[in-house]
């Protein structure tokens, strides 16, 4: 008996499903418009779910290894299948592709083919989670075609992807450092693939910071302020507070703490009383109004109410602003009515140096004041300057050529301005000289000299060819009158003083540098409009003995004159008394100094006074003796003293108006 066995290649109908006979083939490719490739393959004999797809490499024969760029499908599939590759492809490069399947624990491959790439498709962002975030937050970006190693940009600044693949990116929100003044505001989110393709997503935004309040509401430079709100940058360096200054620059307060809901700054300066501030945070600028203002200073007390030169007056109070931190038109400290330039400035005190060469409103000073951002803060506490003299005002221009006249308590002067000789009057409120008749000069002559004053009129001489003209001007009627010409020789730096109803005039020299031996003295009668010769002064027998630039003053009906000389001869010390009643001259005790400047002194209490080089010299005609008193000011010098009343003398020193107590000279 013969047995025969027949085996069929067909699968037994009752065997379990398997993928033992799976095969896979590479068929074709198609270049996609806009970048990418579409690959087609074939798979067969699949009975169980299986992973299958394509593998791509830029290296030939590398597609027989699963280490290359692979994209797989899963499931039971028999027949043709297609997969698209839209990322990780560079234009103009030859790529090799193959089919791949995972069969019974190992990879099987089809046949390798190739194509020349037209590049990759642009990335596509579909959404972000969340859609709004803070700088420093981690967000998820969902989409397609991101490539293997995508880059994320917030504006132009890159954020490293914590997770990055073809469809998902996790990254930290960042922007250009905010303390950089050239920073850009946040505009866009951008993803760039590893092949340089990129896309912009406009539906992502940063939270906008908001300010609810600022505390304290009233602040001072150096104070810490807290800004309450939401959505602030949690990094201190990512926040900036700007307080615009008057000059257009900005002050940047120091950030000492930052959180999402609070910011703390140390104020460096506050440029206006109630500033509009700008907060830069989250790459945005927000303007905040009416939430903060500069606290105003307050006076409390003085260290003393009676002061002397050399003292330090301490003013106590709160919130005194630093003078050098504000513009002059924004902050002014005043001592009485005068600006204070010399002081130490602390928040709770002012230390004022009481110096003798500064200017005060008077011996009685009406407190202090601060003009700050248009707010006037007054401290009406009277302060007594316990001194014998006070400087009232400084005049910027050189006023050495002034001549002065006193009518009652009013002081008038002739001031030379732009070829015009103007009548001015001392304003006792401002201690400035105001023009009396605007646009109406006394004279346009530049030759007014040896000016004197009597009653209500100024008198002066003018040289004209061989004649010395003589004029008067009434300060009330504005009448200018040409009077009898001076019959003597024209001269400079002469004796020129009023005694009773006469003007006495004489001595001096021909010119500034040539004294000559002019020894004649004349007098002019105000009532008769006549000049008459008085006498020839004794002992002037040569140029060396001439009395140009003499020292002189009058006491009652007597004129005292002495010294005098030019710069080219030794100065003289002889001193004389001219009795205008008898027109006689007698020698007296010599001057205690020598000087080459003309000095017109003054007299009161039966004594004569003049000052030179910080010392007052006092002549007592009864005992014919000189005494001296050291001073730190000059109350006359080349310029005639201005005027005097019962208690005070007003004079000029280095273009400064000085008020002096008469009692000072008797102490």
Image: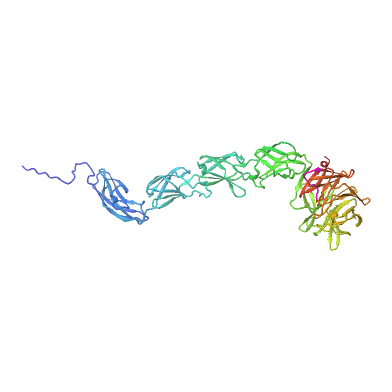
**Occupied quadrant, residue 227:** top right
Q: Main secondary structure of the magenta part?
A: loop
**In the depicted view, which residue is nearer to us: 511 or 332?**
511
Colouring method of the image: rainbow
- Figure check: 26 above or below 232: below
Residue 534 is situated, as x and y percent measured from the top left of the image, at 91, 55
- Placement of the C terminus among the 4 image quadrants: top right
**In the depicted view, which residue is nearer to us: 125 or 400?**
400
Q: Is residue 607 magenta?
A: no
Residue most toward the left? 1
Number of numbered discs overlaid on the protein picture: 0
Would you say residue 457 is visible in this rendering? Answer: no
Would you say residue 310 is visible in this rendering? Answer: yes
Q: Is residue 634 magenta?
A: yes
Residue 430 is situated, as x and y percent measured from the top left of the image, at 76, 47
**In the depicted view, which residue is nearer to us: 143 or 54?**
54
Residue 580 is situated, as x and y percent measured from the top left of the image, at 92, 51
Residue most toward the right? 582
Residue most toward the bottom? 465
Residue range in magenta is 629-637
Residue 296 is situated, as x and y percent measured from the top left of the image, at 65, 40
**Occupied quadrant, residue 629:** top right
- Placement of the N terminus among the 4 image quadrants: top left
């Amino acid at each position: 008996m013969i047995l025969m066995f027949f085996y069929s290649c067909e699968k037994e109908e009752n065997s379990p499903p398997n993928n033992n006979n799976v095969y896979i083939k590479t068929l074709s490719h198609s270049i996609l418009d806009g970048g990418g490739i579409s690959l087609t393959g074939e798979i067969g004999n699949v009975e169980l779910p299986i992973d299958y797809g394509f593998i791509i490499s830029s290296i030939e024969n590398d597609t027989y290894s699963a280490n290359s760029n692979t994209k797989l499908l899963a499931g039971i599939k028999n027949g043709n299948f297609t997969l698209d590759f839209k990322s990780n492809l560079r234009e103009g490069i030859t790529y090799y592709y193959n089919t791949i399947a995972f069969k019974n624990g190992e990879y099987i491959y089809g046949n390798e083919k190739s194509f020349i790439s037209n590049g990759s498709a642009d990335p596509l962002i579909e959404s972000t989670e969340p859609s709004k975030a803070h700088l420093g937050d981690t967000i998820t970006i969902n989409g397609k075609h991101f490539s293997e190693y995508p880059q994320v940009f917030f504006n132009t600044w890159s954020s490293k992807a914590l997770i990055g693949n073809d469809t998902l990116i996790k990254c930290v929100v960042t922007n250009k450092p905010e303390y950089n003044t050239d920073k850009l505001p946040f505009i866009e989110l951008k993803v760039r693939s590893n092949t340089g393709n990129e896309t912009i997503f406009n539906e992502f935004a940063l939270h906008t910071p908001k300010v609810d309040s600022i505390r304290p509401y009233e602040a001072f430079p150096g104070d810490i302020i807290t800004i309450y709100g939401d959505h602030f940058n949690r990094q201190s360096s990512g926040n900036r507070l700007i307080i615009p200054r008057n000059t257009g620059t900005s002050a940047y307060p120091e950030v000492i703490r930052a959180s999402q809901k609070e910011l703390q700054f140390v104020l460096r300066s506050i440029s206006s009383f109630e500033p509009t501030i700008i907060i830069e945070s989250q790459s945005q600028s927000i303007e905040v109004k009416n939430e903060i203002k500069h606290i105003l200073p307050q006076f409390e007390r003085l260290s003393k109410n009676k002061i002397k030169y050399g003292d330090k007056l301490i003013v106590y109070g709160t919130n005194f602003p630093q003078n050098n931190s504000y513009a002059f038109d924004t902050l002014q400290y005043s001592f009485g009515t005068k600006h204070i330039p010399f002081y130490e400035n602390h928040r709770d005190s002012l230390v004022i140096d009481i110096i003798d060469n500064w200017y005060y409103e008077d011996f009685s000073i009406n407190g202090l004041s601060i003009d700050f951002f248009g707010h006037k803060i007054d401290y009406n506490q009277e302060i007594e300057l316990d001194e014998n003299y006070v400087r009232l005002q400084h005049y910027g221009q050189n006023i050495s050529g002034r001549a002065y006249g006193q009518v009652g308590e009013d002081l008038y002067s002739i001031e030379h301005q732009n070829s015009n000789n103007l009548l001015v009057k001392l304003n006792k409120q401002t201690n400035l000289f105001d023009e009396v008749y605007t646009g109406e000069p006394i004279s346009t002559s530049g030759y007014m000299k040896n000016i004197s004053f009597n009653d209500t009129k100024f008198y002066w001489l003018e040289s004209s060819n061989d004649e010395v003209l003589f004029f008067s001007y009434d300060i009330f009627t504005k009448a200018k009158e040409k009077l009898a010409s001076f019959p003597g020789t024209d001269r400079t730096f002469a004796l020129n003083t009023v005694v009773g109803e006469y003007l006495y005039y004489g001595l001096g020299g021909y010119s500034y540098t040539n004294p000559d031996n002019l020894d004649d003295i004349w007098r002019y009668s105000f009532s008769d409009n006549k000049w008459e010769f008085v006498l020839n002064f004794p002992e002037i027998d040569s140029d060396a003995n001439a009395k140009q630039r003499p020292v002189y003053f009058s006491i009652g009906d007597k004129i005292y004159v002495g010294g005098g000389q030019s710069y080219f001869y030794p100065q003289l010390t002889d001193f004389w008394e001219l009795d205008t009643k008898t027109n006689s001259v007698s020698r007296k005790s010599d001057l205690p100094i020598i000087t080459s400047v003309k000095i017109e002194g003054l007299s009161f209490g039966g004594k004569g006074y003049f000052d030179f080089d910080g010392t007052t010299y006092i002549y007592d005609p009864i005992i014919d003796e000189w005494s001296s008193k050291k001073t730190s000011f000059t109350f006359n010098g080349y310029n005639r003293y201005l005027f005097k009343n019962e208690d005070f003398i007003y004079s000029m020193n280095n273009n400064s108006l000085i008020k002096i107590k008469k009692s000072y000279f008797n102490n």
